[in-house]
Amino acid sequence: MKRDYTPIDQFVMGLDQAIETVFGSPKVTERKNPAVGVEETQDMPEPTRDHTARLMRINHTGEVCAQALYQGQAATARDPSVRESMERSAQEENDHLVWCETRIKELGGRTSLLNPLWYAGSFAIGAAAGIAGDKWSLGFVAETEHQVESHLDSHLAEVPDDDKKTRVILEQMKEDEISHADKALAKGGVELPLPIKKAMKLMSKVMTTSVYRL
């Protein structure tokens, strides 16, 4: 029998998810890290290693934001099937979180100090999108994933061809983002107005610039 959670229950579970996402070990799916078993790049120049670690830090923070968006949207979704779809996509984004963090550590880098701030802001945006209605919330997901796909393409263009461990992670992430966008549109998502798309791109630019440094 499915349990009906009280608002307090939901708040506590949401807080637990936030802590796991930003500070701990988030719950992942059954999928393994695609970079497991892939040979490490030998003699990678230090500037290249540092730059790649910073790019992966951006991707990690992007997944923190995506996780917060999905959790915020799931909390305010009206249709149970939409909520379940959001929750599954959020769990797959957790895979990306773990993969990115693992690669960052392998490259000698660290995750962003700004992750708590970006999580809070993204959760609020996701909840607001959900309150606006499921079709807008799903449309927001689709546009977010399209922008992330473009963002991953730009990073793939910067990562050296012989850094196969980083590339295989980014390529699998890109495939998943495309799938999440398609799923959101299939569930009834609508195209967002151009001003909102531009605002999202501006916010993404602020995030990438700040997280690359911090």
Image (spheres, rainbow, N blue to C red):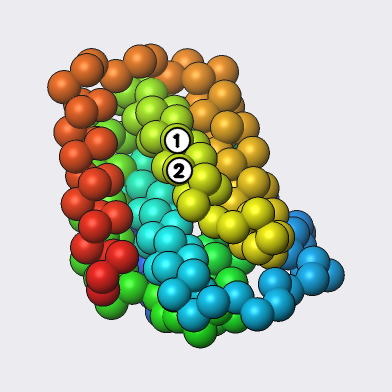
> Position of 89 compared to 122: left or right?
right
Q: Going 52% across and 45% down the picture, which residue do you hit?
A: 157
Q: Going 54% across and 56% down the picture, which residue do you hit?
A: 159
Up the image or down, 52 lies above or below 155; here it is below
Q: Looking at the picture, which amino acid does disc 2 mark? A: Ser
SS class, disc 1: helix
Q: Going 58% across and 41% down the picture, which residue do you hit?
A: 174
Residue placed under numbered mark 1 in the picture: 150
Closer-to-camera residue (82/194): 194
- Quarter occupied by the C terminus: bottom left
Question: Mark on residue 108?
Answer: none
Q: Looking at the picture, which amino acid does disc 1 mark? A: Ser
Q: Residue furthest bottom?
A: 108
The percent coordinates of residue 183 (x first, y second) are 58, 27
Cα–Cα gap, marks 1 and 2:
6 Å
Q: Quadrant of residue 143?
A: top left
Closer-to-camera residue (155/208): 155
Up the image or down, 101 lies above or below 133; here it is below
SS class, disc 2: helix
Q: Is disc 1 surrounded by few (<14), some (14 to 19) or many (20+) residues within 10 Å?
A: few
Q: Is residue 67 visible?
A: no
Q: Do residues under tags 1 and 2 come within 8 Å of each other at their CB atoms?
A: yes
Q: Is disc 2 surrounded by few (<14), some (14 to 19) or many (20+) residues within 10 Å?
A: few
Q: Going 51% across and 40% down the picture, which residue do you hit?
A: 153
Closer-to-camera residue (102/128): 102
The percent coordinates of residue 55 (x first, y second) are 43, 61
> Position of 101 compared to 66: left or right?
right
Q: Is residue 196 visible?
A: yes
Residue placed under numbered mark 2 in the picture: 154
The percent coordinates of residue 62 (x first, y second) are 39, 54
The percent coordinates of residue 176 (x first, y second) are 62, 41
